[in-house]
Amino acid sequence: MRVRAGAVLAGGALLLAGCAQDSGSTSPADVVGQGYVSGDGSVRTWDAGDRSEPVTVTGTDFEGEAVDTSVWLGEVVVLNTWYAACAPCRAEAPDLVELAVDRADDGVRVLGINTTDEPGAAQAFQRTFDVPYPSIDDRSGQAVAALSGAVPLQAVPSTVVLDREGRVAARVIGLVEGTTLSALVDDVVAEST
């Protein structure tokens, strides 16, 4: 019975691990030294007065276009790390697409950050889910490095909401539920109305 309980706990820990990849180091969130970092869907928000300096994410999307979030100042920006084979990334994709389409008129932009895929795999994912927003090809890790104080570099998926000044207002580590994402964005949009 004790062995079965241990196996169930280990299996549950692996399910919580999400799709994060090995960063080369072991941390308390590392599941039994296997290189998977738990993304449990935990949410953190910052009050406007407690937010750090603005962050800027730049890169080139999978269509070869330059992307720079500093040109989106004045809008609410949702950043989402993903890669094509990540099951939680695939599960949350329809909610991110819906948000991008439904909230564009409210000054909300969505940007994907992909640190893993070759262009073909990333573009196939984008076609599969009818993704209307750009995703940066970040195999170099430069775009994610801009978020290093807000998001663990190895946690995929992760979602970050930037306020209209480009400051981190909220983050979700792991799969983000559509209702949670909408509520976080609603709160940040309401700050400036």
Image (tube, rainbow, N blue to C red):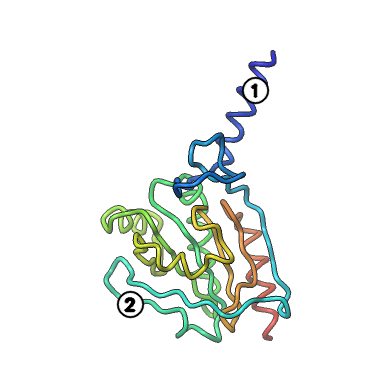
- Check disc 2 and report its element: helix, strand or loop: strand
Q: CA distance from mark 1 to mark 2?
A: 49 Å
Amino acid identity at mark 1: Gly
Residue 51 to residue 84: above or below: below
Give, as a three-letter code, the residue at label 2: Ala
Quadrant into which the C terminus falls: bottom right
Q: Quadrant of the N terminus?
A: top right
In the picture, the disc for residue 6 is 1
The number of numbered badges drawn on the structure is: 2
Q: Position of residue 166 (x, y in %)?
A: 56, 80
Q: Secondary structure at mark 1?
A: helix
Q: Which residue is mark 2?
A: 66
Residue 183 occupies which quadrant of the picture?
Answer: bottom right
Image coords of residue 64 (percent x, y):
27, 71
**First reached walking from the N terminus: tag 1 or tag 2:** 1
Name the outermost residue toward the top: 1
* 1 vs 2, front mark: 1
Q: Residue furthest front?
A: 25
Which residue is painted at 43% across and 63% down in the image? 113
Do the residues under discs 1 and 2 have CB atoms within 8 angstroms? no
Does residue 100 lie above or below 13 as drawn?
below
Q: Residue at x 69, y 73 (%)?
A: 187
Q: Nearer the viewer, residue 51 or 43?
A: 51
Around disc 1, counting alpha carbons within 10 Å, would you say few (fewer than 14), some (14 to 19), or many (20 or more)?
few
